[in-house]
Amino acid sequence: MRKTVAVRDLAVSKKAGRPRKSANFTAILMLAPFLLAYLLFFIFPTLRAVQLSLTDSTLTETGPFVGLANYVQLLGDADFWAALRNTGFFALLTVIPTTLVGLVMALAVHRLVRAKNFVQALFFLPFVLPVSVVTLLWQWILNSSFGIVHALTGSTTSWFGELATAMPTVAVVTIWWTVGFNMLLFIAGLQNISKETYEAASLDGAQGIQVFRYITWPLLWPITTLVLTLQLISSLKIFTQMYLLTGGGPFNSTRVMLQYMYDTAFQNLSGGYASTIAVAFFLIILLVSLVQAALLSRRR
Amino acid sequence: MKQLIDGYNKSQNKYQVQQTVLQWGVPFYTKVRTSTSVGQAPDLISFHLSRISGWAPENLLRPITTQELASVGLKQADFFPRLWQAAGYQGKTYAIPLDTHPLVMYYNKDLAGKAGLLDANGKLKSINSVADLTAAFKAVKDKTGQAGLAFENGPNSYMSWRLWLSMINQEGGKIIQNNKIVAGEPGKRALQAMVDWMKNGYMLKNTDYPTSVAQFTTGKAAFMLNGVWEVPAMADGRAKKTINFDYGVAPLPKFYASQDMWADSHGFAIPNNAKKPIASDHLAGVLDFVAYVQKNSMVWAQGGHIPAYLPTVNSSAYKALKPNSDYATVAAQNVAFDPPGWYSGAAGPLEASAAKYFPAAIQGQLPIDRAISMFEAEANKLMSGKPRP
């Protein structure tokens, strides 16, 4: 696919009667609040975290500078690597499944004529729930002595408490909760494919699966890469569901990176080392998403 | 507490107390810690005495002098000695104890009766060893078909730590020495007892906290080991007839040499606001309020907690308060707190670590030795870290 660049807008500013300088000033003025918030709440804390990662700080007091000692410790920290593995495992369980499910739901909803908005709202509904509600709901459903699943099947499995099931169950809950958003993105993508393209395809004799294979899927690819990238980043950043559903257990087997960071900072009161984990993890996410974006965009 | 604050605000018009409630555990302590270090902490906080040894050396709490206490009519002799001791650090008092909430044993009189565990007066026959208690669970299971014990044992649950600590203390053992776990054989024996109860089917698997309470209150278990904080729910359930059996509350049994039982306490402490010490009129108000609460701690006692203030516990009104007075004195004299240290205490990292491995052993996910060694490794790593600060 070729990009079409809109050149129309470029000429506009010259025609406008006002000098360029004041237009710039207006732009800066309008950007300022956002820029300020961005600097204050994103750039500054990031730099501060980097700085703290080089100190031996507690939760509330900045400690002495220790150079790269924390990073050296991190390399040999089995808990760090375990948390990284757990985070990767969770991403594996969620990124592609939730993209696929979102796509299938979008295709199904898109075909509907009458109940479309209703079904779409129904599928989207879990996404509007706060995480605490979602987790409570599933804790009730899956409670091994009083839950609905127990009542229906007699299963006494502790879904969030057993080694084999804890991580997959959190993954399923997360997909259930967030897939509606991906569905919406795909529906938006589907709506952007013009009817004429489909008409042309059907004139050429394309049917059923062929239409999807040669028209829908390639034209949806930009959306798919977007969903995959967003999903990867959010899966790597998982914290709340895990914190509320398994607490990282049983015995650390579902402790993901952000929880390890949280434990280190807020429970073990080690602010410096927690910052080191944060910075290292930031770099890992950055790297992984760049690699992913590069791999996915090659197909274009 | 709300009732006490409202009562205080109405009783005088010199001071006005405003209450903020925060979530128990890590969120609470993190908030207090950060607000204190930026000078925005409240004038008074309620505080677990088990955390004094971590907070006092960090200068996060303001010591309270004997004279200040005397100015509102309070003195050391008015409080249970073990609680007063827990409120101090290196000879200074950092909190005024409000209560203690130990681990106690609830029992269902119907089920216990059917299992032949009650005496002629309808009280629980004495239980003097782990074997006695195990036999009681077995009798319940054999004769009534119900579970012996309702006990929170799901992932990340704290109850096993509490019982573990109680049993080690009763044996005269130690948990920590020189920042190292030294629980050794008593530690293994204590965990073994819990694992065996599960293995023999005396308690239900994977019970989270609400489930364990529901199990007992719906008559599906004859005993429950839990904190005294469930007493109001029990009394309320009886009054509203949602609980259909007679129940009793006994102190944790004497399994070994002593009758120590895990407990924690609430106390009142004054945050040491950074660079902004509490103003003298606020201090006077704080002390006045604390004294009011102590003198009206009958209200607080109805929450199941045992008041730290002896005049309340010794009063005839308290003696008439059932089932509280059945366990209060023995429990309060035998309270055993978490070992001292910055890592210790309510929702501290040491408890959190035990809560990962002990329940896993009880569920059979980890062999006992492995669970203990994993806990020791994590705890030792934690404690070997520099004391903070």
Image (tube, coloured by chain):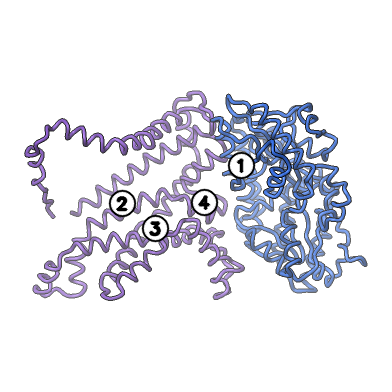
Chain colours: A purple, B blue
Disc 4 + disc 3, Cβ < 8 Å? no
Q: Earlier in the sequence, mark 2 or mark 4?
A: 2
Disc 3 crowd rating (10 Å Cα; few below 14, some 14-19, many 20+) is many
Circle 3 SS class: helix
Q: Amino acid at mark 1?
A: Pro
**CB atoms of marks 3 and 2 within 8 Å:** no
Q: Nearer the viewer, residue B213 or B285?
A: B285
B272 vs B314, left or right, is left
Which of B1 and B91 lies nearest the eye of the viewer? B1
Q: Is residue A8 above or below residue B71?
A: below
Label 1 resides on the chain identified as B
Residue identified by numbered label 1: B349
Would you name the residue on which mark 4 appears? A243
Disc 1 to disc 3, C-alpha distance: 30 Å
- Residue type at mark 4? Tyr
> Can you give x and y, in whole percent of width and height, for residue A64 in the image?
51, 23
Please name the residue that numbered disc 3 is placed on: A94
Place of residue A257 in the rendered image (x, y in percent of width and height, measured from the top left):
46, 45
Q: Are marks 1 and 3 on the same chain?
A: no
Q: Judging from the image, what secondary structure is the residue with disc 1 in?
A: helix
